[in-house]
Image: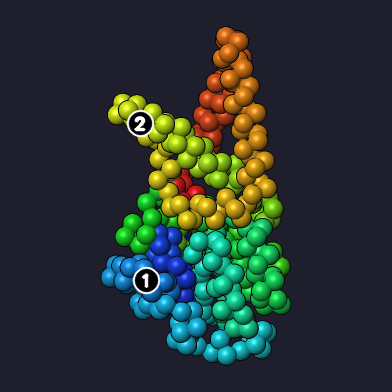
Amino acid sequence: MAAIRERSVFERVMIVGVGLLGASLGLALKERGLAKRVVGVGRAASASLGIAKARGAIDEAHTEIHTALLRFGRSILSTSGSIPFTGGPQELVVLCTPLRQFPGALEALRGRVGPHLLVTDVGSTKGEVMGWAKRILGADARWFVGSHPMAGSEKHGPGAARADLYDGAVCLICGGEAEAAALGKIEAMWQAVGMRTLRVDSAVHDRWVATISHLPHAVAFSLMNAAAREPESLQAAANGFLDTTRVASSDVDMWTDIFLTNRAALVAAIDSFTADLSALKAAVVAGDEPAIRAALSNAKKSRDELVARRTPGQRESGSGE
């Protein structure tokens, strides 16, 4: 870990969006000494900046990326490739806002990204994000690395932030056309805050998370809506129902953006799930006990094997993913 930590030190890190994920990253970076200064950017009307600063997740707060960049060093004065990558301390911008705010943030960074100002994100979809980076940053997109830390909670906001939020979780890395040095630096940063990293293509990423993350949230939201049609029944809800619908308490803005930026993969996942549910329904209607038992047994076997494969210390992702 010492070698990783050495390679992961940044002079400054700008976190755009200091909600749960952004503030938790700030806490993790500061606790581990991975950034000399953490700068937060957020909306003027939101209390998040003040909460994040009071909790020690950021050292200073700004409401505009342009203003925050004035506090950065020589990297923002350079054009792409004018300063050679040395592997030493650099500056980093991490996009942690809802997904559809990314293009505006990337526009503010256009012409300022380079070997000493890297950019990554925590977005839950990657095809759209990588496309935005390439379109907006142009040739400088090679200093952008797509990241998706599979960590979170149904709670949101900097008040729920934790320095250990990322410990033991997986971070999916989509390098695209990123420079190898930038890719290695971002990957090392996530490892240094306790994550296991896995490099995947953006299209593969979006298919995977549609099934293991986005579909479960869609099901939880739908199940909660279905149950709420008979609100009296909810007074009898026990832990099984609460566990199954826990992620329905997730941030609505964030999940609206996720659903809209991964539409094709999510629709395919919903179609697959609907087919399985319809088959189970047909078996129940027909009183087909063998078919019901087969469906339940297959699901139980798959989940038991999944749990058995998990390594010691590996924890389940929260609602954020």
- Identify the disc placed on residue 231: 2
| Mark 2 residue element | helix
Percent x, y for residue 242? 37, 34
Q: Residue at x 62, y 31 (%)?
A: 274
Q: How many labels does the image show?
A: 2
Percent x, y for residue 163? 36, 60
Above or below, 114 relative to 245? below
Observer-nearest residue: 70 or 302?
Answer: 70
Q: Which residue is drawn at 54% across and 56% down?
A: 257
Residue on which disc 1 sits: 45
Q: Residue furthest front?
A: 229
Q: Residue at x 69, y 55 (%)?
A: 201
Residue 63 in the figure: left or right of residue 217: left
Task: Look at label 2 and name its amino acid.
Answer: Pro
Report if the CB atoms under discs 1 and 2 are less than 8 Å apart. no
The crowding category of the residue bearing disc 2, from other C-alpha atoms within 10 Å (few below 14, some 14 to 19, many at least 20), is few
| Mark 1 residue element | loop
- The answer to whether residue 229 is seen in the rendering is yes
Q: Which residue is drawn at 51% across and 56% down?
A: 149
- Color theme of the render: rainbow
Percent x, y for residue 94? 51, 69
Above or below, 173 relative to 277? below
Percent x, y for residue 1? 47, 63
